[in-house]
Image: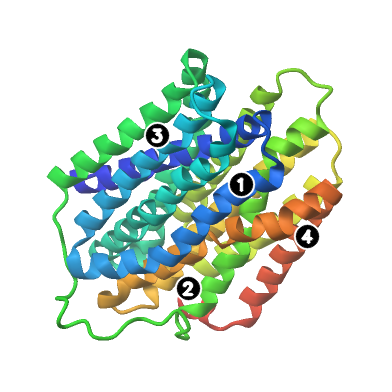
């Protein structure tokens, strides 16, 4: 692995650390200080809107101004957002800041991640597309996804240990690693540009026939994933309140989800080398099954089993969809394509407070049955739309 590839992966790994730990810790901390489940979801939702509005712009900017510059900008924004997210909580807990300011400051801190942190992913994936032949792209994209997933796996574990030292320690440590990744990227990655600004006069529309099907798929998948991530802390706390060490059970849930997705990405894209089309088909079947079991199950063992199945399915479909949209585009549109795809990933976090959390509050099982229906719709979409077969490598 060359140094550039290493720093791209380390950057995504660093982002994964903070993203997963924020989902684990911020909801219960915020609720302990008086914020509701809906308010907590709104914090992540507003950041997701900012991400959706800026991701495609950063992708296009990476085509014009260089992959390295945009990737670094995203890493710095991510690092700042972590510090800005935990500091208000610490200050309220220690009576340095009035409670009334907590909600808007948490929105501001998380929004920095949406506005700037959204730059890293499209620049990284576009760079990988620049240097990778079509027949290797699914594998390379899966390894980038895997780097992020390793971060989400390590985040709750390392963060949980650092949390024993101080509530600030995990967030400040992960922010520091983001800065390290930015410095390493600066010194080891060439600032490649696909086109000059004056040459690139045409934008890649998100409604182009080679783009929108992948965006639809990613949008629906995003809603199911975001509703799961944002409900895990509440679900484990509410459903298994009779068990001891609830924070540990929540961390184990994220661990199982991440490790199964990671193993799936390496197993089915690298070892067995399944085609994109089959990855999408079998992945959506597994996701549908997982959410049905999740809604029906009433034991922690059954819940963990469904989480593992869900992780395996997600590890199959995400790199396949990312690779598919890349393969369908010309070289000068790789950044924009990655940006468009990145812009719809946050849709789930935008809609979760509106759709998912009300369902959860009414009946937690209904949320997971709803996700199962959405995943089955994705299965039908893959079977019926020809573009998913045309990018089948």
In front: mark 2 or mark 1?
1
**First in sequence: mark 1 vs mark 3:** 3
Residue 231 vs residue 125: left or right? right
Residue 215: horizontal and vertical position, in percent? Answer: 52, 72
Question: Does residue 322 appear in this view?
Answer: no
Instruction: Find the distance from the CA under tag 3 to the CA under tag 4.
Output: 35 Å
Instruction: Find the distance from the CA under tag 1 to the CA under tag 3.
Output: 29 Å
Instruction: Find the distance from the CA under tag 3 to the CA under tag 2.
Output: 42 Å
> In the rendered structure, are the residues bearing label 3 and label 4 in contact, judged by CB atoms less than 8 Å apart?
no
At 81% from the left edge and 29% from the top edge, which residue is drawn?
240
Residue 33: horizontal and vertical position, in percent? Answer: 64, 29
Which quadrant holds the N terminus? top left
Residue annotated with mark 2: 392
> In the rendered structure, are the residues bearing label 1 and label 3 in contact, judged by CB atoms less than 8 Å apart?
no
Residue 97 vs residue 311: left or right? left
What secondary structure is found at the residue carrying circle 3? helix
**First in sequence: mark 4 vs mark 2:** 4
Q: Nearer the viewer, residue 104 or 258?
A: 104
Up the image or down, 116 lies above or below 248; here it is below
At 61% from the left edge and 52% from the top edge, which residue is drawn?
226
Instruction: Find the distance from the CA under tag 2 to the CA under tag 1.
Output: 22 Å
**First in sequence: mark 2 vs mark 1:** 1
Residue annotated with mark 3: 83
What secondary structure is found at the residue carrying circle 1? helix
Residue annotated with mark 1: 311
Q: Nearer the viewer, residue 360 or 5?
A: 360
Q: Nearer the viewer, residue 371 or 96?
A: 96
Mark 4 surroundings: few (<14), some (14-19) or many (≥20) residues within 10 A: some
Residue 111: horizontal and vertical position, in percent? Answer: 45, 50
């Amino acid at each position: 692995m060359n140094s550039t590839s290493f720093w791209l992966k380390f950057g995504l790994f660093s982002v994964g650390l903070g993203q997963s730990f924020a989902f684990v810790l911020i909801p219960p901390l915020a609720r302990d200080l008086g914020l509701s489940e809906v308010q907590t979801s709104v914090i992540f939702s507003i950041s997701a809107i900012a991400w959706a509005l800026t991701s495609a712009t950063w992708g296009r900017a990476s085509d014009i101004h260089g992959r390295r510059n945009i990737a670094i900008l995203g890493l710095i924004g991510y690092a700042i957002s972590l510090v800005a997210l935990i500091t208000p909580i610490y200050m309220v807990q220690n009576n340095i800041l009035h409670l009334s300011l907590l909600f808007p400051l948490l929105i501001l801190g998380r929004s920095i991640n949406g506005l700037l942190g959204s730059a890293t992913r499209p620049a990284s994936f576009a760079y990988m597309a620049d240097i990778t032949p079509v027949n290797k792209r699914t594998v390379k994209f899966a390894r980038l996804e895997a780097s992020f997933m390793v971060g989400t796996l390590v985040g709750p574990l390392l963060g949980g240990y650092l949390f024993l030292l101080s509530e600030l320690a995990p967030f400040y440590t992960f922010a520091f690693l983001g800065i390290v990744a930015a410095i390493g990227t600066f010194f080891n990655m060439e600032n490649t540009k696909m086109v000059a600004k004056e040459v690139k006069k045409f934008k890649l529309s998100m409604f182009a026939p080679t783009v929108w099907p992948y965006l639809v798929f990613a949008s629906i998948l995003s809603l199911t994933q975001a509703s799961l991530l944002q409900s895990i802390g509440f679900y484990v706390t509410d459903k298994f309140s009779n068990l001891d060490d609830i924070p540990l059970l929540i961390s184990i849930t994220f661990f199982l989800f991440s490790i199964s997705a990671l193993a799936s990405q390496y197993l089915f894209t690298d070892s067995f080398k399944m085609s994109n089309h089959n990855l999408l088909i079998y992945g959506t079947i597994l996701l549908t099954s997982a959410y049905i079991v999740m809604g029906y199950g009433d034991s922690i063992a059954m819940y963990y089993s469904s989480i593992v199945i869900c992780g395996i399915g997600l590890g199959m479909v995400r790199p396949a969809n990312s690779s598919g949209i890349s393969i369908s585009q010309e070289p000068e549109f790789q950044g924009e394509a990655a940006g468009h795809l990145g812009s719809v990933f946050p849709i789930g976090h935008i809609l979760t407070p509106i759709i998912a959390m009300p369902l959860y509050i009414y009946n937690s099982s209904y949320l997971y049955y709803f996700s199962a229906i959405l995943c089955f719709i994705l299965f039908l979409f893959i079977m019926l739309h020809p573009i998913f077969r045309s990018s089948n490598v």
